Amino acid sequence: MGAIKTILTIIYVIVCLILIVIALMQSKEDEGASGTIVGSSSSSSFYEQNKGRTKEGKLKKWTIILGVAFAILTLILGILYML
């Protein structure tokens, strides 16, 4: 059980560091929360349709993936350390 904790802790630290770096690499979106609520009128532009293929789109996708991995590893490590 000790080896599993050690391996998961190392993976957890790596995920945390990569998540921090990727979050810092992202550019600030000017719309913020009000753009989410109100919406944007330029949703039909070429850039908006292909946003997932840009650098910003890929960074956002990896931020979400690593955020989910962070949450799952947090729960698993919390359970393992309680045992």
Image (cartoon, rainbow, N blue to C red):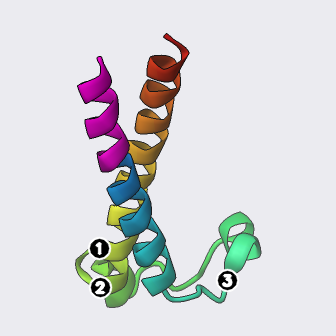
In-image side of 34 versus 23 (left or right): right
Residue 59, located in which quarter of the rendered image?
bottom left
Residue assigned mark 1: 58
Residue assigned mark 2: 55
Q: State whether residue 80 is above or below residue 33.
A: above
Category of crowding for the residue at label 1, using alpha-carbon neighbours closer than 10 angstroms: few (below 14), some (14–19), many (at least 20): some
The reply to whether dot 1 and dot 2 touch (C-beta < 8 Å) is yes
Q: Quadrant of the N terminus?
A: top left
Residue 60, located in which quarter of the rendered image?
bottom left
Badge 3 amino acid: Glu
In-image side of 34 versus 25 (left or right): right
Q: Earlier in the sequence, mark 3 or mark 1?
A: 3
- Which residue is drawn at the image coordinates 27% and 79% (left, top)? 50
Give the prevailing secondary structure in the magenta stretch: helix
Q: State whether residue 82 is above or below residue 46.
A: above
The secondary structure type at the circle numbered 1 is helix
Q: Residue 27: which disc?
A: none
- Residues in magenta, as a range: 1-11
Image x and y of residue 31, in percent: 67, 83
In terms of depth relative to the viewer, which is nearer, 17 or 67?
17
Image x and y of residue 15, in percent: 36, 56
Residue located farthest toward the top when viewing the structure as drawn: 83
- Which residue is drawn at the image coordinates 41% and 66% (left, top)? 17
Residue located farthest toward the front when viewing the structure as drawn: 2
Residue located farthest toward the right when viewing the structure as drawn: 34
Badge 1 amino acid: Lys
Badge 2 amino acid: Lys
The secondary structure type at the circle numbered 2 is helix
Residue assigned mark 3: 31
- Which residue is drawn at the image coordinates 26% and 27% (left, top)? 4
The secondary structure type at the circle numbered 3 is loop
Q: State whether residue 68 is above or below residue 44.
A: above
